[in-house]
Image (tube, rainbow, N blue to C red):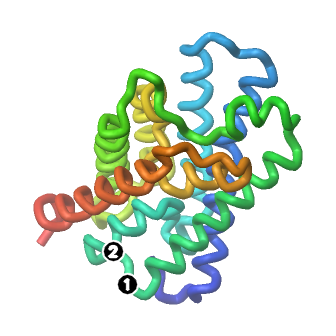
Amino acid sequence: MSNSVSLSQKLSAEVLGTFIFVFVGAGSAVASRYIGITDPGSALLVAALANGIGLGVGISATMAVSGGALNPAVVIGLWVGGKLPAREVVPYIVAEIVGAAIAGGLLVAVAPRAIGNAVHWGAPGLSSATSVAQGLLFELIMTFFLVLAVYGTAVDARAPKIAGFGIGLLVLADVLVGGPFTGAAMNPARAMGPMIAGLYFPSYWYIYWIGPVLGGILAGLVYHRVLEER
């Protein structure tokens, strides 16, 4: 993260970038329902593309200011790897939750209420065939991949300069794999924004914090201790 940028600018960028990502990602579920996409495969592809592209754009728009974390699990993963000062961790996370909640609130304001309620405003959810433990592990693994991609395409000085594109593609792939089972949030803010806006909190809501945060910590440690250039 650039030291020449003030913390208030960084936090503003995190609010804006997370807003873009969540509005597009969660909004795709509402839009799919509105236009009558009932085929699960088609709906999954729409969700994967929207979340991947939305995150890629959000990162690209904010990377020069805040680093384009846009995800509490990424923030913690960067801190564990020594890439983000401890004093910025909580402010970043709060900014991301605020951006996600604004996105969810605006979706509630602009979309037909019946349609949004039917899909819980794009909040992720466990399938009936997926246990809480399985869902938590799924989120952990997918977020591990995501944070590795962040390090390998955006953080490492040796990385190709494709950060937003590369990370967005990883999210697209993760949604294709994990979307049917957990909704593939990989991001506590992405999960909580629609839940806050729709006042919808399933009994397993906490897996979207525990799984991603553990995955982010593990990825940060692995990259810092094993893969990073010494």
Residue 160 seen in the current view: no
Q: Is residue 216 left or right of residue 193?
A: left
Q: Is residue 191 left or right of residue 219?
A: right
**SS label for mark 2:** helix
Q: Is residue 58 left or right of residue 176?
A: right
Pick the front one: 43 or 188: 188
Residue 49 seen in the current view: yes
Pick the front one: 60 or 158: 60
Residue 24 percent location from the top left of the image? 68, 43
| Amino acid type for the residue under numbered disc 1 | Ala
Q: Are marks 1 and 2 in contact (CB under 8 Å)?
A: yes
Residue 79: mark in rendering: 2
Q: Crowdedness of circle 1 by 10 Å Cα count: few (<14), some, many (20+)?
A: some
| Amino acid type for the residue under numbered disc 2 | Trp
At x 29%, y 57%, the residue is: 214
Q: Is residue 132 above or below residue 196?
A: above
Circle 1 is placed at which residue position?
A: 86
Residue 182 percent location from the top left of the image? 45, 34
Quadrant in the picture for residue 129: top left
